[in-house]
Amino acid sequence: MSRSPAARQRGEPWPALRPLGGLYLVLARAYHRLYDRGWRRPRTAGLPVISVGNITAGGTGKTPAVAWLTDRLAAEGRRVAIVSRGYRGRRRTDPLVVARGHQLLADAIEAGDEAIELASQARAHVVVVGRSRVEAARRARREGADVAVLDDGFQHRRLQREIDLVLVDAVDPLGGGRGLPAGWLREPPAALGRADLILLTRAPVELDLDRLLSADELPAPLVSVLSRLPTAERPAVVGCRHEPSELIGPDGLSCALEHLRDRPVIAVSAIAHPERFRDTLQRLGAVVVERLTWPDHHRFDVLDAQRIRRLANRYDAALLITTAKDAVRWSPAAPRPHVLRVRMESRAEALVLERVRGAIDNWRESQR
């Protein structure tokens, strides 16, 4: 199996950086304490904001969760904006309107890969990215949005939000238990006390239930964190899963997932958990003959394209396949791949939406 030497895999800690990881968590705690104690105050955007975030860097399935929530709110007749930082976007205008409806107004180089993926798949009224999420949300309001879903918003305290939905990965709840860059934690685990609702992502089927999960059903590391919080600060937890939803061919047309069964494939990805992409393909019956992996958010260049093409030529009968997130960064010099899309599912959907609607209603009541 091929693998780019620069690709740091999610399960690989860097013990030598442990002091830096500890310092990172200390600084993060100090920053959030400014808001917790009221020494700094969040700013409003003139519309209700629903935050979707996590406490670890990547790998929790945040993008499908944002798309899922956006689609559900849009189905209720709401004009939903997706507001994001636009990670690694090189834009000249800030904030930047990435899309109105399904009309794309920017590309992945300007807006970042996640914003383009969301604009392409979710039923958003508008997608706006900006270094200042406050100004981006205000721009969304001027574009006619009546509610904003804040992508990756848990650590962004500057923008007032009505509810915090926090994603925790069922397999690796605490990102190795160390702060960046030694591990994957973006703040201490006790920060989960700020969450209004935890979505346990990639939960096993037996935990995808239409009710709140009890403590004895949760992963041990998560139980350990929640049990140390004051009772009033312990967020409820629901289970959800991320499932393959669609296979898009090189011609842009949808293929049945059964198209992968018993087919040799070359898996190309630049995501936080490349091994999960491989496992998903194998679960769908594909035979993964080679893998190419790069670090998360990597932009494929001409040299990458040449490497991909050589491998595709070597395995002429194999399907070249990548993720929806990687497809928006794909080099035009590389052969066109099949693209596997993933969606979030939860039997507790009604419970989650009830809490989100309640938060929106509370905001409206506060404006009267």
Image (cartoon, rainbow, N blue to C red):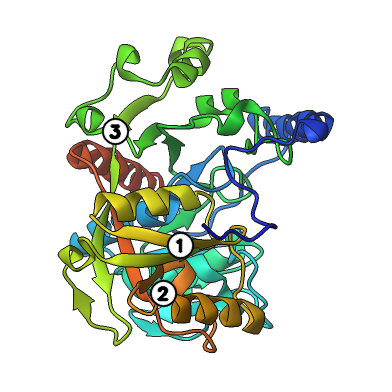
- Asked if the residue under mark 2 is in contact with the one under mark 3, i.e. CB atoms within 8 Å, the reply is no
Q: Is residue 333 left or right of residue 235?
A: right
Answer with the quarter of the image where residue 190 lies. Answer: top right
Q: Taking 265 as reference, is 244 above or below it? A: above
> Local crowd at mark 1 within 10 Å, few (<14), some, or many (≥20)?
some
Viewer-proximal residue among 161 and 333: 333
Residue type, label 3: Gly
In the rendered structure, which disc, 3 or 2, sits on the residue that comes first in sequence?
Answer: 3
Answer with the quarter of the image where residue 249 lies. Answer: bottom left
Q: CA distance from mark 3 to mark 2?
A: 39 Å
Residue type, label 1: Glu
Residue 303 is situated, as x and y percent measured from the top left of the image, at 66, 80
Residue 254 is situated, as x and y percent measured from the top left of the image, at 21, 76
Q: CA distance from mark 1 to mark 3?
A: 33 Å
- Asked if the residue under mark 1 is in contact with the one under mark 2, i.e. CB atoms within 8 Å, the reply is yes
Viewer-proximal residue among 256 and 58: 256
Q: Is residue 49 visible?
A: no
Disc number for residue 26: none
Q: Taking 233 as reference, is 62 above or below it? A: below
Q: Which residue is mark 3?
A: 239
Image point 59% across, 60% down: which residue? 133
In the rendered structure, which disc, 2 or 1, sits on the residue that comes first in sequence?
Answer: 1
Q: Is residue 200 left or right of residue 164?
A: left
Q: Which residue is mark 1?
A: 290
- Asked if the residue under mark 3 is in contact with the one under mark 1, i.e. CB atoms within 8 Å, the reply is no
Q: Taking 13 as reference, is 215 above or below it? A: above
Image point 45% across, 78% down: which residue? 312
Disc number for residue 315: 2
Residue type, label 2: Tyr
